[in-house]
């Protein structure tokens, strides 16, 4: 079984992958939460991933448990994504890019993904 909850513009995920569930789901249950009825804000500290989307259904934020500073962000690392359109695409050309994705990592470094 898996728990999937929807937040405004996002999704929380805590997936059970063993007979007794993941560490996250066991911690949530031990804290007195019923994953079937708990609010998203109550489940958030136990989720492994959070995704936020823009109006075009592209990921704009990904929070990852264990990818951040344990003393300043509780171990949650936030990755953000921005998208840029080519201002002068060559129509009909497979050699020109249309959208470039840039990822900003929890430490502030950025990576420009290959344009698509």
Image (spheres, rainbow, N blue to C red):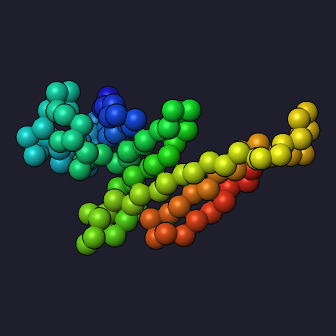
**Most extreme residue toward the front, as rendered?**
87
Residue 24 placed where, x, y %? 25, 47
Image quarter in which the N terminus is found? top left
Q: Is residue 93 at all visible to an observer of this figure?
A: yes
Residue positioned 47% across, 56% down in the render: 79
Residue positioned 35% across, 55% down in the render: 65
Judging depth in this view, the residue of 29 and 43 nearest the camera is: 43
Taking 73 as reference, is 1 above or below it?
A: above
Picture mark count: 0
Residue 94 placed where, x, y %? 89, 40
Residue 89 placed where, x, y %? 84, 43
Snapshot quadrant of residue 6: top left
Q: Is residue 18 at all visible to an observer of this figure?
A: no
Instruction: Answer with left or right where residue 47 lies relative to residue 103.
Output: left
**Most extreme residue toward the left, as rendered?**
32
Residue positioned 73% across, 54% down in the render: 114
Instruction: Answer with left or right where residue 48 lies relative to residue 90.
Output: left
Judging depth in this view, the residue of 31 and 55 nearest the camera is: 55
Residue positioned 57% across, 57% down in the render: 103
Snapshot quadrant of residue 75: bottom left
Taking 50 as reference, is 9 above or below it?
A: above
Taking 60 as reference, is 4 above or below it?
A: above
Residue 17 placed where, x, y %? 35, 39
Instruction: Answer with left or right where residue 52 lies relative to residue 34.
Output: right
Image quarter in which the C terminus is found? top right
């Amino acid at each position: 079984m898996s728990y999937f909850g929807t937040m405004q513009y996002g999704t929380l995920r805590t997936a059970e992958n063993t007979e007794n569930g993941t560490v996250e789901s066991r911690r949530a249950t031990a804290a007195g939460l019923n994953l079937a009825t708990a609010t998203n804000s109550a489940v958030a500290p136990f989720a492994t991933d959070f995704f936020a989307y823009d109006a075009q259904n592209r990921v704009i934020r990904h929070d990852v448990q264990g990818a951040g500073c344990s003393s300043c962000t509780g171990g949650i690392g936030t990755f953000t994504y921005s998208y840029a359109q080519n201002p002068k695409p060559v129509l009909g050309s497979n050699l020109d890019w249309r959208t470039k994705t840039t990822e900003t990592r929890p430490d502030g470094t950025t990576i420009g993904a290959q344009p698509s």
